[in-house]
Each structure stands twice: as structure tokens, then as C-alpha cells.
Amino acid sequence: MYKFIKSRFIRNYDKTSDPSVRVRYGIVAGIFGIVTNVVLFVFKILAGVLSGSISVVADAVNNLSDAGSSVVTVLGFRLSGRPADAEHPYGHARYEYITGFIVSLIVLIIGILLMKSSIDKIINPSPVETGVWTFVVLGVAIAGKLWQGGLYKNFGKSIDSAALKAASADSRNDVISTAAVLISVTIAAFRPDVMLDGYIGGLVSLFIMVSALKMIKDTLNPLLGVPPEPELVKMICSKVMSYDGVLGIHDLIVHSYGPSYCFATLHVEVDAKVDIMVTHDLIDNIEREFNEKEHIFMVIHMDPIVTDDPEINNLRDSISEFVKQAVSPECTIHDLRLVRGVTHTNVLFDVVVPYGIGKDKKQITDMLTDRFRTPENNYYFVINIDNKYTA
């Protein structure tokens, strides 16, 4: 069914890397959410008012907030599809993250308001008058929300959208909350003296608030900056290493300006003996092919390395193994070179360390000095500490 909706309302729905297709996905999902949530709100509010159930009314208001969230989602996708301009040269795709955050914030506010109403109902309990109409409305609502959440999840997965994934999680929460309300009114139908309506409403409100806080974290993280997905890192590294003339890579940094807008910088090690014009042509080809085939705007720094000096090769291997054992298994080194003098030799290189290892630059330098300096070589270590920007 989801595929039918895609093919019917989204032109070229399979070309999800196309920004215009992404926009259409978001708009179709948003309009669907607006219509279904307004319908559910109308029927639930009628059922809640007629039965006097605060939990049913709270559930109805939650659906109304979902409709408002869908309006925000449509607006966000429309804005994210705008082309780059002088003020925003990286495009507007991060609007998706912003709308996902707004949706999450709306859900949190609704949860707080519902908690207040539930507490009032606990303090001032009143009987709930249930009927067949109430059970039918809640049953249909659960089925509708399951289908709605599935559509959001399917669409969100197709275009890797934070906003639609947040909406899917919210729909899942709605299923749970409506099921709790259904249990509450069922108990009220058979035991009118057991007034659980306010307590069930409070539990539903608490669940909504906790879920909203998690959604807020998930939508803010991309705005703050997170490591790229391991699959993307693996693809970039393996593809770059497949080019003849590339001896190694390091310092990969990936910036995301939305799911379809990716910028990356990378250092590529090449043989210092090869003509610089030949190497420059290799680097240009790699950058161009990543742009054309992977839609990644790649900028590569060329690092020439010496490959035929036995002392450098042995020292590089020894130091690399030592930092893995003494500092962290995740540590790597690069750009090692020697500056030989009359009285001593400077050993210059970078060490890439993960966060939280508990050792600073001086400690690492002292460890290397104690391990490798001898009267014969008299090494002096000049180290630059790099952070690891990939997971």
C-alpha cells in the first residue's frame, strides 16, 4: 500500500537522492498526517466530551497537536527544498532537522498540558460514561495510527528524514497512549466505582513527555554535529584506497548540511617520488568522481611520504604499534618524517586519539621518548595531537 501511495503521488519516487523528490515525500506525508489527525481529533473529542473522560479528551488533543506538527513538517520540507543562495551557500536542507525539533517540542508541551489535566482529574475524580461509540472510535484510532506510523517510517527510511522518523515515533506513542485509554474506559464500563481515568491520563502524559525528550535529542544532534555513519566512512575510505597511487588516508572529516548535502575533507598519502603534476591529476579525478557519483563535495589534501627510507619505515611501524598498545587501540599515526641534525634527530608526526583516553600531549611524548630514545639515535619527538572525527 505504501508503495502504491508513493507511485501515485510522488513523481520519480525511487530517485530519493534528488532533493525535489525528497520535498515531495515530505509534503505527501505531511498532508496525509494533517487529514488523518484532524479526522481522529473530531471523533475523539466528541467521544471524550460525551463520556466525560479526561483521558479520551487528552488523546484527542494529542491528535490535534499531531495535525499541527504535520503542518510544520510540510513547511519544513518546502523550505528545505529551496536552492542555495548568497546567505546560505550550503543550501537549506537542515530545515528538516529544525522541523523535527519543532515537532518534538510541540509533543513535549502537549504532554505537559495533558499531565496538568490528568492531575486535576485525579484530585477531582468524576465517573466516566462509556458507550459503544467510545470503543469504536478508540479501536479505529489505534488501527489508523498504526497505519499512519508505518507510512511515516517507510517514507522516513526511504529519504533518511529526521522529521518523518520523529513523526513515526510520535505515531507509535499515540498507539500506546490510545491503547491505555481504551483499557481505562473498559474498566470504567465494568467498574464505575474504580476511577482510573486521571491516573491513566497521567501515565499517557508521562510517556509522551519522555518520548518527546528523546525525539528532541535525536533531532538536535545533527544540528550540533555528529560523526558520520560508519557505512559512509567505510565507503569513502575503500573507494579512495581503490585508486592507484593512493598509499594511505587520514583526517577524514564529514560535514552534513542535510541528508542529501554532504561535504568532506581528507588527507591522501602519495609517494613523494612521483611527479607532482601526476599526483595532482589523481587527486582531481578522485574529487570529481565523488562529486559526480556519490554527491559528496570532496576536498583532498595531498601528503607526500617517503617510502624508500628503512629508518623511517621501521620507526613508523614501531611507533604505530606502540601507541596502539600504550595509549589506545584506536590510536593511529600519520605524516611521520625525520629531520636529521648533527646532535639529534627530530621525529615529527601526528597522533590521532579518540576522546576520553585520559592522556595529554606531554604524557604521550614522554612515553615515546622513554621507549625510543637511545644514545645512538637521540630522537626528539615533535608531536601534534589530532582528534578523531569519525566513529
Image (cartoon, rainbow, N blue to C red):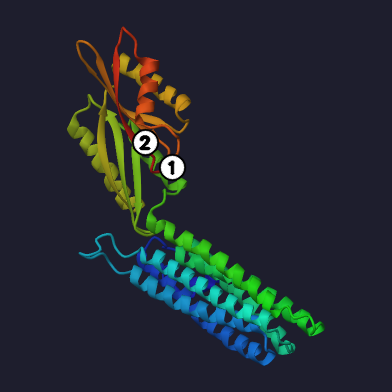
Residue 83 on image: x %, y %:
28, 67
Position of the C terminus, as image quadrant, is top left
- Occupied quadrant, residue 175: bottom right
Instruction: Please tell me how crowded label 1 is: few (under 14), some (14-19), or many (20+) other residues with Cα within 10 Å.
Output: few
For the point 61% across and 77% down, the residue is: 144
Q: Is residue 230 left or right of residue 289?
A: right
For the point 58% across and 78% down, the residue is: 116
Residue at the far front in the pictured view:
123
- Say which amino acid is labelled 2: Met
Residue 66 on image: x %, y %:
52, 77
Q: Tag 2's secondary structure? A: helix
Residue at the far bottom in the pictured view:
50
Instruction: Please tell me how crowded label 2 is: few (under 14), some (14-19), or many (20+) other residues with Cα within 10 Å.
Output: some
Instruction: Answer with mark 2 or mark 1, whichever residue precedes in sequence.
Output: 1
Q: Is residue 85 left or right of residue 256?
A: left
What label sits on residue 241 in the rendered view?
2
What label sits on residue 234 in the rendered view?
1
- Say which amino acid is labelled 1: Lys
Residue 152 visible from this viewpoint: yes
Q: Is residue 200 left or right of residue 383?
A: right
Q: Nearer the viewer, mark 2 or mark 1?
A: 1
